[in-house]
Image (cartoon, rainbow, N blue to C red):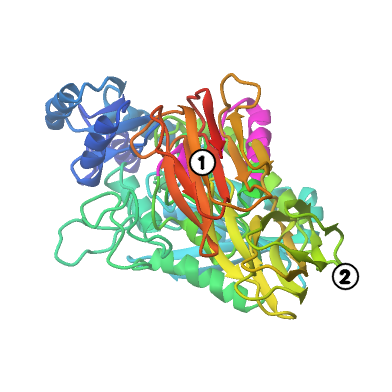
Amino acid sequence: MKAAIFLVLILVAVASGRETGLRHFKGYKVFTTLATTKEQLDALRVLYLGSDYDFWTSPNGLGATDIMAAPEQIPELLKMFGEHGMEYTVKFEDVETLVEAERVANAKASTGRIDWTSYQTYDSIVEFLTTINSNIAAVSVIGQTTEGRDIHVVKFSNGGPPKKSILFDSNIHAREWIAGATGTWVINEILTNADSYTAILQEVDIYVIPMINADGYEYSRTNDRMWRKTRSVNAGSSCMGCDPNRNFDFQWAGESTSSDPCSDIYYGSAPFSEPETQAIDRFVREAEAAGVQFYAYITMHSYANLWLIPWGYTAGAYPPDFPALLSLGQAAVAALQAVSGTVYQAGQGADILYGAGGTSYDWAKNHGIKYTATIEMRGNSFVLPPEQIIPNALEVWAALQVVIQRVIETVPVEEDPTPVETVTSCGGEIEASSAAINFQLDADIPAGQSCIWIVKPTFDNTRARLVSSGLIGGSGIYFTEFNAYAGTPGQHVQIANVGEDYTFNGNFFLVTLTVAVGANTGFSLEWYSSGLAGGAPSFSGFAALSTPTGSYSYPVGGGQYANSENALFIVNPEVAGTRTLAFTRLDVENDATCSYDAVSVLTWQNNEYTQLAKFCGTSLPTPFNLPTGLALVTFRSDSSVTGTGFTFTWA
Ligand code: 0X9
Ligand code: ZN
C-alpha cells in the first residue's frame, strides 16, 4: 500500500515536472520568424551566434526560423523583431505545456519495457541491446561518453568476410528523442522480421549505433528537455557540453558554429574533442582497417522533414557525385512519403537549410563514404508525441531500405579494356565510361587554336593517359575539374608526359587544348573510369559557340528561366584572336553576393580557367576582353525566384 502511494506520488511528480532539477518552460514561447532581407537575416545571425536564445532551427536565407524565448526575454526579442521590421508568428504559446503533454503521454504509454510506444531511458535501451540474442546480430561497445556510459553498435550480418557496409546512427543531438527511438526500432525490426531481410544480408552488413550522445540524452530526460549538446566540462566556463554535430574534423569551426562554450552550436575545444565523436571516427577507421568498406552513412536527427545531402558546410558546394546522392535522396523521400503521406524535401544541406561546419555527414562524405545523409525526421518540434514513434519509424525505414537497395546495386566496376568511344573533333561532350580523344594525329594545328572537350565519366575514378603527342613548345592539354552545380572550375592538371597515368576523382572535367605555336601535330589521349557510378549532371542549358562573332540569348525560346538550372555556354571561335564579350541584357534574381542565382564569366588564361566576374540582378557588367578568344559563361539558379535571363555578344 505504502509502496503504491509512493509510486503514485512519483508518477504525479514526474507528470507535473516537479522532479528535482527539472528545468521548467513555463511561459517560454517559440516564435517563427522569416527573414526576407539580408539585413534581417544578419540581425538573426547575430542573435544565433550569441548564446542567449535557444534556436530550434537556424536562420537561413530562404526559410523560417524557430526561436525559443524565456518569459523575461520575450519583450526584448519582440523589440528586435520590431526594429528590423520582421514578421513573426507564435508557434508554441507555452513550451511547458508541450513538454508536459509529452511527459504525461510517455508515462501513460510506458509499459516498463521497450516497445516503441514510449520514449525510453538509457538504461532501458541498454537492456534491450545487451539482451539481443540472434545469429544475425552482434552487439559491441565502441566507446564511452564523458560520464562513462557505453556507446553500443549493433552489427547485422549473416557471417563470412565483410560485405558492403552501411552505417546508421542516431541521437547525436540529445533532445531529438525520436532519432534514438527510430534507431532502436530499426534494430528490433531486423531482429523480429529477420526472414524478410535474409536477401539483404546476403549482400550487405548493416551497423546501427542507436544512441551516441547518451549523457546528453539522459540529461534531456532528467533535467532539461531542450538539451542538445554533450555533457563534457569546458575549461574556464560554467557552461557544459559541445555540439557533437559541429565537432567533426571536416570544415570544423566553419559556418553556424561558435567558439562560445555556452552556445548550443559550440564546436568544442578541438575537432573530435568529445569521446562520443571520437568513438564514431575510431569505429569507422578500425572497421576499415579490418576490411570493411562503408558505402552509406545515414545520421538521424529531428525535426523538419528533410533529407540533407553533402556538402552541408556552405551553400553552393557540391561533391562531384552530387547527382547520385540527390537521386538517392529523392527516391528515399518518395518511398517515405508512400507509407503515410508525410512530405519530405531532399537537397544539399546548406542550400535548403543552412551551412554548418563540422557535421558528421560531411565528415563521412569527405572520408570517402559514397552515400551520406542527415535525416531531419517528422514533426514541428523536438517534442514528438510517443504515439508517433512507430509511424515515423515505418516511414523512415522505408527510406533507409531504399538506401540499402541502392548500396546493393552499387557495384564497383573495373576499367574498360579499350576506350568505348573515340572523338576526333575539336571539342565536344563525351559522356561514357571511357574514351579516346584522337585529335589531328598527323596533321598541323594552327597556332592560337583551342579546343574544349567536356568529359563526363560514368564512374568516380578517372585515369587519363596520353598515348602519343605531337604538341610542341608551350602547347598543352589540361584536365580541369568542373563543378557543374556551382559553375566553378576546381583543380587543374597538365597531362604532359606520354605514357604517364593521371588520376582524378570526379565526374566532370573540362579537357582543354592550348596550341601556342604552329606546326604542332595533335595527340591521342585516352581516359578510363572505374569504381562506383557517380552520374554527371546534364546541363539545363548548353551551347558550344564557335562562330567568329555572334549573339546568344538565354533561355533560348525567351520567357523565364527555370529553378535549379545549371547551364554552360562555351565561347570558343574556331578562328583565334582577341575578342570582346559583352552582356546586352540581364535579368537574374538579385542578392548581394549572388549566392542564389548567378551568371559567371571565366576565361582561359595561362592555361587555367579564371573567373572574371560573377553577377546577378539587372545591371550590365562592363564588357570582358577575351585574350585567347575563349570564354565560359555559366549560369545557375536556386530553387525559387526566376528572371528572364540574359543575352551576350562576342566580336
Ligand atoms: O544543425 C544541425 O546539426 C542539424 N540540424 S538539427 O536541428 N538536428 O540540429 C542539421 C545539420 C545538417 N547540415 C546542414 N544544415 N548543413
Ligand atoms: Zn540534430
For the residue pair 388 and 486, the one nearer the viewer reads as 486
Badge 1 amino acid: Leu
Q: Residue 236's x, y, as percent?
A: 14, 65
Measuring 18% from the left and 42% from the top, which residue is drawn there? Answer: 52
Measuring 61% from the left and 27% from the top, which residue is drawn there? Answer: 555
Element carrying mark 2:
loop
Task: Establish whether ligand 1 lies closer than 8 Å to the Cβ of label 1.
Answer: no
Q: Which mark is residue 581?
A: 1
Q: Quadrant of the C terminus?
A: top right
For the residue pair 125 and 395, the one nearer the viewer reads as 395
Rendered position, 420 above or below 577: below
Measuring 24% from the left and 43% from the top, which residue is drawn there? Answer: 22
Find the magenta span and give its range.
Answer: 328-354
Badge 2 amino acid: Pro
Relative side of 501 to 32, left or right: right
Task: Establish whether ligand 1 lies closer than 8 Å to the Cβ of label 2.
Answer: no
Callout 2 environment at 10 Å: few (<14), some (14 to 19), or many (20+)? few
Q: Residue 302's x, y, as percent?
A: 45, 40
Specify the quadrant of the image occupied by residue 160. Answer: bottom right
Relative side of 394 to 150, left or right: right
Check residue 544 for magenta coloring: no
**Helix, strand or loop: magenta stretch:** helix
Looking at marks 1 and 2 on the same chain, the residue that comes earlier in the sequence is marked by: 2
- Evaluate whether residue 347 shows in this view: yes
- Evaluate whether residue 144 shows in this view: no
Q: Quadrant of the N terminus?
A: top left
Q: Give the labeled residue for mark 2.
A: 417
Specify the quadrant of the image occupied by residue 86. Answer: top left
Find the distance from the CA under tag 1 to the CA under tag 2.
43 Å
